[in-house]
Image: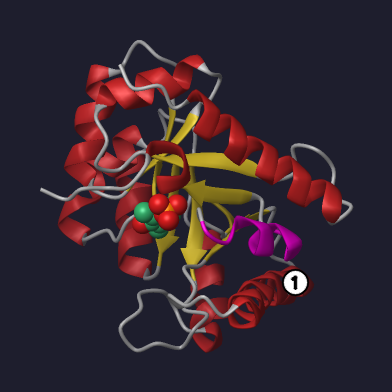
Amino acid sequence: MTTYFSAWQAVESRIQQALAANGRPTGSARLLAVSKTFPAEAVAEVYRYGQRSFGENYVQEMVDKAKLLNALDIEWHFIGPLQSNKTRPVAEVASWVHGIDRLKIAERLSVQRGNSLPPLNVCIQVNVSGESSKSGVSPEALFELAQQVVALPNLVLRGLMCIPEPTDDQAKLRSQFHLLAALRDALQQEGITLDTLSMGMSADLELAIAEGATWVRVGSAIFGARHYA
Ligand SMILES: *Cc1c(COP(=O)(O)O)cnc(C)c1O
């Protein structure tokens, strides 16, 4: 059995150090362990260390792992792009959906969630880099979508999520994280209460925490390199 313990622990300490360096309280940013492409056994192993929140990008993969690990107290986060014909299993299995970028998806999730489960926590994904290939709503369209999502009965709009431009340019990354935080502040000014910024991955979690991240989504720094079939 592979052990991920030292890698997981190193990520946890990077998070706590970044929080301390920015004068933020311990625990104010949390680790979402991104387990996509890794087997259920890997998730179960990291669960043994105390990790409870896991992120998945592919609907069927999340559903399969959730079924296999049904006995464990795992909180599943769906972080991938979501097509409207695949919302139902996500509405039934996930506790969080990070990548909401259109009303139709949010409406379907709300209906399919129903009111027998706790409300589904969602974040709106914002295209902070302006790349045309990127999913996410534009900053200009954010306020209207946020108002519409807030009105849906079985969802709770918790905050915003972004995936910055793939670059090593620290200043550029940081300015894109800063933009997400500024958009969160602007929504709060309009009376939309948000407590979540989902931003930062293996390579840039310190920059994201400096800008206020509350979930960092970390895969390869815990589980190693991904190999796609
Ligand atoms: C894969 C993925 C991650 C994790 O990326 P790493 O670089 O492996 O930490 C985070 N967020 C999203 C949306 C992803 O798809």
191 above or below 224?
A: below
Q: Residue 110: x and y, percent? A: 38, 49
How far from the left and from the top, in percent, is residue 68? 23, 18
Q: Is residue 209 magenta?
A: yes
Using the image, determine if residue 49 lies above or below residue 136: above
Quarter location, residue 69: top left
Q: Which residues are magenta?
A: 203-212
Residue shown at 84% from the left, 56% from the top: 22
Placement of the N terminus among the 4 image quadrants? top left
Q: As drawn, which residue projects farthest toward the top?
A: 71
> Residue 137's x, y, as percent?
44, 78
Badge 1 is on which residue?
A: 185
Q: Residue at x 49, y 52 (%)?
A: 122
For the residue labelled by badge 1, is the local secondary structure a helix, a strand or a loop?
Answer: helix
Residue furthest out toward the left: 229
Residue 218 drawn above or below residue 75: below
Question: What amino acid is at disc 1?
Answer: Asp
Report the side of 162 relative to 207 (left or right): left
Q: Is residue 31 left or right of residue 3?
A: right
Reply yes or no: does residue 9 show up in magenta. no
**What secondary structure characterizes most of the magenta part?**
helix
In this orientation, does residue 76 appear? yes
Residue 30 x/y as whole percent: 63, 41
Residue drawn at the location 67% of the way across and 64% of the way down: 207
